[in-house]
Image (cartoon, rainbow, N blue to C red):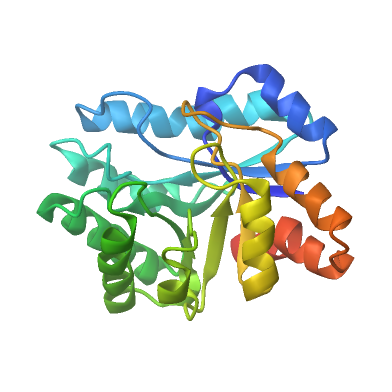
Amino acid sequence: MIDAHIHADTRPYEDFEMMAVAGVDTAVSCAHDPMRMSTSEVVLDHIHRIMENDTKRAAKNGLKLYSAVGVHPRSISSDYEIVLDKLPELLENKNVVAIGEIGLENGTKQEKEVFIKQLKIAQDLNIKVIVHTPRTNKKEITELTATIIEDNIDTSLVLLDHVDKFIIKRVLDFNGILGLTVQPQKMTVDEAVQMMEEYGYDKFVLDSDMSSSPSDPLSVPKTVHKLRLSGVDPKNIKKVSYSNAADFYKI
């Protein structure tokens, strides 16, 4: 199994062992906002921790950890351009599979500027992006997010994450991939299963988004277990728990 979106830097060593024992052998750890990102140095230190320290911690427990790097909408420093200038170099690392997670939180002018600049970098370099959708004003902000994506990048390069029943119809036609985040306060296992039963299995990947927020490192295995109990075709289970993410990230 692949957990398509986590934040390894916020999790204890033991979580990686738990995931590996439950059958998750691969995960993608994204840049986010674990602390106040007052300067570009803080952002870059955060990114290097994901790429280096957390990769080693996960590997010691049998979990292959890939990285996504970028400027999260909640961690935009005043000198964020320095981070963007370094992105092409960071993306050369064989362990980095995407720019992310990026997107909009409140839809401010600065958020939109930073988001668009990162999408254009991804388009120019033909690299994948992981795009955040917020908890608050989700439908409104997702509409703006989707429009910006459509105007600035080939949607086949995009994993739009934290998709739920309120935004699914707006983004279902994207050529990219949609993330179902099975996490307390976001989506339950039953809600994820229902979403896949209604909209199919070709467009979705599963992730826990485990972070400093309430999280469950086993949410992907638990969802797979529920799919099996529900009699879902094993080929479809493999798509959402492994193949779709592997094909998208090329891992």
Q: Residue at x 40, y 74 (%)?
A: 170
Q: Is residue 109 visible?
A: yes
Compared across the picture, whether 110 is left or right of 248 comes to left
Q: How many marks?
A: 0
Residue 76 position in % (x across, y down): 22, 40
Q: Residue at x 58, y 27 (%)?
A: 54
Which quadrant is the C terminus positioned in?
A: bottom right
Compared across the picture, whether 237 is left or right of 123 comes to right
Residue 53 position in % (x across, y down): 56, 24
Q: Residue at x 32, y 45 (%)?
A: 86
Q: Residue at x 61, y 18 (%)?
A: 12
Up-down: is 47 above or below 89? Answer: above
Nearer to me, 128 or 229 = 229
Compared across the picture, whether 229 is left or right of 26 comes to right
Up-down: is 120 above or below 24? Answer: below
Residue 120 found in image quarter: bottom left
Q: Is residue 251 visible?
A: no
Up-down: is 203 above or below 137? Answer: below
Residue 9 position in % (x across, y down): 51, 26
Up-down: is 181 above or below 128? Answer: above
Nearer to me, 133 or 168 = 168
Residue 139 position in % (x across, y down): 32, 62
Residue 202 found in image quarter: bottom right
